[in-house]
């Protein structure tokens, strides 16, 4: 498609003071090189004349244009104050309209990220859209989001329940090492509040600890999956809040425990893992599917298989517990 770099830069900062050096397409990504137009730049300290020392190029991720991810290459000016008595040696001219210091996203891309995350988008999805890394999006989110969120404490003010959930966000390196993050949700208003790039106790506890007193003090429920870490976070930081485990997570653990029981009994009875044709192996699906409980035929079939493979009634007991939890899960609030 046709790309007019002038149009992009107009959207970026307005053309004033910014000059386009070139536009190029690099594979799937569009690249625009820009520089600031400096007329007689002065030293910020002594207002004396300066000279250009260096022109470092810094890459920023911008919003896609017409579906094409954009990189802004900003050819900066590293200037030196020529006044020998001035303590300022060298400095780089910035422009927060283009990008903030320490942020690898342009200002407008960063603001877009904050809005998207506020409406429930995931960092990994946004990173993919922008053709950048999870870290870049997360840093931008934290940098811009913090100021926006402290201005907008309304949604935190009104919540009495915060949920912590672990999310797999990337597999890196030759061994596909898993990286986990923590999503923080306002469970009352069904809103994503924040994302923490780890699921470790110190960082997650720090996050909760750093919330304003009125939020921590009013918190009635801390919702979690069955993670010991999140349990400890709520227990230590907000001991008065009741810790609640999501019923779907409870169900998952009940199913895992039932399956573990079935395999253990199988091993004890026959001395080997389940093989096709054996009663407990045949029963494995009937034990987990929802239909068994409400279908007399399936129920009878399961009972027959358990009578053969589960003489002590251990699997039957575990199945009964699982079904009781399923009833609890399906009960409407
Ligand atoms: Zn100076």
Image: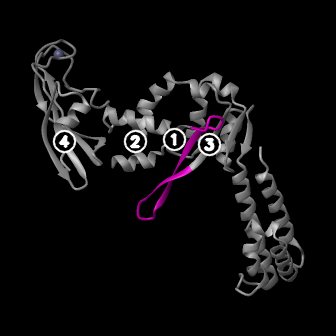
Specify which label sits upstream in the sequence, 4 or 2.
4
Specify which label sits upstream in the sequence, 2 or 3.
2
**Colouring style:** one colour
Q: Between label 4 and label 2, give the one nearer the viewer.
A: 4
Mark 3 sits on what residue?
164
- Distance between mark 2 and mark 1 Cα atoms: 14 Å
Mark 1 sits on what residue?
120
Q: Dot 4, how many residues are within 10 Å of its Cα: few (below 14), some (14-19), or many (20+)?
A: many
* Magenta segment includes 305: no
Specify which label sits upstream in the sequence, 3 or 4.
4
Q: Quadrant of residue 105?
A: top left
Q: Quadrant of residue 112?
A: top left
Question: Magenta segment, which residues?
Answer: 167-191
Left/right placement of residue 159 relative to residue 105 reads right
- Residue 62 x/y as whole percent: 29, 40
Specify which label sits upstream in the sequence, 1 or 4.
4
Q: Respond yes or no on whether mark 4 lies under 8 Å from ligand 1.
A: no
- Residue 116 x/y as whole percent: 45, 38
Q: Is residue 327 something one can see in this rendering?
A: yes
Mark 2 sits on what residue?
137
Q: Is residue 264 above or below residue 122?
A: below
Ligand 1 located in image quadrant: top left
Asked if the residues shown at circle 4 and circle 2 are in contact, with their CB atoms under 8 angstroms apart, the answer is: no
Per the image, label 3 sits on a secondary structure element best described as: strand
Residue in front for this viewpoint, 251 or 88: 251
């Amino acid at each position: 498609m046709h790309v007019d770099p002038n149009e992009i830069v107009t959207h970026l900062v307005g053309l004033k003071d910014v000059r386009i050096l070139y536009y190029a397409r690099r594979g799937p990504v569009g690249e625009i090189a820009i520089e600031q137009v400096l007329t007689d730049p002065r030293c910020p300290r002594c207002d004396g004349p300066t000279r250009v020392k260096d022109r470092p190029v810094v890459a920023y991720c911008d919003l896609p244009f017409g579906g094409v991810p954009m990189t802004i290459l900003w050819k900066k000016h590293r200037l030196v104050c020529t006044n020998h008595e001035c303590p300022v040696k060298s400095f780089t001219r910035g422009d927060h309209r283009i990008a903030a210091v320490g942020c690898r996203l342009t200002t407008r891309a960063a603001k877009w990220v904050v809005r998207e995350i506020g409406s429930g988008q995931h960092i990994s999805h946004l990173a993919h859209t922008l053709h950048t890394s999870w870290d870049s999006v997360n840093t931008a989110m934290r940098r811009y989001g913090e100021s926006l969120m402290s201005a907008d404490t309304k949604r935190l003010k009104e919540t009495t329940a915060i949920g912590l959930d672990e999310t797999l966000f990337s597999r890196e390196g030759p061994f596909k090492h898993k990286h986990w993050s923590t999503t923080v949700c306002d469970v009352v208003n069904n809103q994503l509040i924040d994302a923490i790039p780890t699921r470790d106790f110190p960082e997650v506890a720090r996050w909760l600890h750093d919330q304003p007193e009125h939020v921590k003090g009013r918190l009635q429920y801390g919702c979690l999956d069955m993670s010991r870490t999140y349990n400890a976070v709520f227990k230590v930081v907000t001991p008065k809040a009741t810790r609640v485990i999501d019923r779907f997570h409870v169900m998952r653990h009940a199913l895992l425990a039932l399956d573990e029981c079935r395999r253990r009994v199988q091993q004890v009875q026959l001395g080997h893992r389940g093989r096709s044709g054996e009663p407990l192996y045949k029963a494995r699906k009937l034990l987990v599917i929802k239909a068994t409980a409400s279908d007399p035929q399936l129920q009878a079939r399961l009972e027959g298989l358990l009578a053969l493979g589960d003489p002590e009634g251990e699997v039957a007991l575990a199945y009964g517990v699982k079904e009781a939890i399923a009833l609890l899960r399906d009960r409407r609030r």
